[in-house]
Image (cartoon, helix red, strand yellow):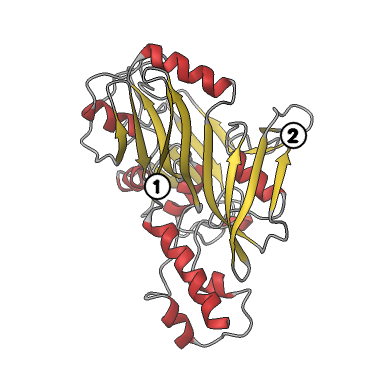
Amino acid sequence: MTVLEKDKSDQIQLIVKKKYHSKRIDKYLVSRLQDYSRSNIQKLIKEEAVKVNNVAVKNSYEIKLKDVISIQLPTKDDDHITPENIPLDVIYEDEYLMVLNKSPDMVVHPARGHASGTLVNALAFHCNKLSSINGPLRPGIIHRLDRDTSGVILVVKDEKVHKHLALQFEERKIEKEYLAVIKGKSEMDSDKIDLPIGKDKRDRKKMAIRHDTGKSAVSIFEVIERFFGYTLVRVIPETGRTHQIRVHMRTIGHPIIADSEYGNSNACYIEDLMKPVKEIHSLAKLKELCNNIDEPIIDRQALHAYRIKFFHPVYNKTVEFTAEMPEDMLNLITTLRRINALLN
């Protein structure tokens, strides 16, 4: 993909590279525009704000090599947040802060041209008060998760508490733990990845290991369970760089399953899980493992923010919260276990 331009009217143009040939345009754009949810992308296509070679297309259109895709982003005239009645999975709440379990395919805060359907829109509906320290478009937001990363996220209502927690983040006193299913069978039970991360030279929307201009980035991973060709790991990031876990795991040769940006795949099917298993070939066996072999088991990166631990500055105690794993990751792990059981 090459970004040609983004002009004053918020139009983005992309040229399709060979590796994306034959992908559905909605899935392609979801993988390339990380600040937009699937529903937002599909809405833009339906409203004919997306054109291929100057022609409006449907969500099912399969892109071709060198197609020129033009996306007319909706303009945003002010910094007003529109409250939206979007359900929230609240793990904990008091008058100073909230801990939520963010669902996959939810952008945390509005960006230019993307003013609805975000976590912030939901918070504006459900909360009477939110910290305004990070500006009018990010009320209550002190850290973020990628659109397709699910799990625990901290939201702050009180500005004094916000400042205290921000200092804890800065001093690396807040502990976060993620669960991920990675490609390959990790030979090491645990390891520390200490590699600096910065903007990718070839694609400024992505991150990469940069020994020249990158910032310090440290992740510790530990194997929880091994499968045939895949591994469930626990990852504790000591720093909070953008896409840190995804970049680090890809760099050590174990990209996260269905990571469209760093794993060359935007979905995982039963056939993908069976590839490392040479002993099972029959369609009957596939059907035993999955009700619909044509549907993806998971169509976003298999990464879940499982736990957060921090010091509550008002109640003067350390608190810890966990977020239940969503159904798609549970199905993925269950299927991998069933494959193991068939072979043992």
Residue at (65% x, 40% y) in the render: 219
Quadrant for residue 116, please give it.
top left
Q: Is residue 237 left or right of residue 298?
A: right
Amino acid bearing label 1: Pro
Quadrant of the rendering where the C terminus is positioned: bottom right
Residue at (68% x, 60% y) in the render: 186
Dot 1 or dot 2: first in sequence order is: 1
Amino acid bearing label 2: Arg
Residue at (57% x, 49% y) in the render: 234
Residue 281 placement (x, y as % from top left):
56, 86
The label number, if any, that marks residue 210 in the structure image: 2
Residue 279 placement (x, y as % from top left):
62, 85
- Vertically, is 159 above or below 214? above
Residue 52 placement (x, y as % from top left):
46, 49
Residue 142, can we see it?
A: no
The label number, if any, that marks residue 330 in the structure image: none
Q: Nearer the viewer, residue 52 or 76?
A: 76
Query: Label 1, on which residue?
Result: 104
Quadrant for residue 139, please give it.
top left
- Vertically, is 25 above or below 290? above
At mark 1, the secondary structure is: loop
Residue 290 placement (x, y as % from top left):
41, 75
Q: Nearer the viewer, residue 174 or 180?
A: 174
At mark 2, the secondary structure is: loop
Residue 190, can we see it?
A: yes
Q: Nearer the viewer, residue 119 or 29?
A: 119
Quadrant for residue 237, please give it.
top right
Residue at (49% x, 45% y) in the render: 69
Q: CA distance from mark 1 to mark 2?
A: 29 Å
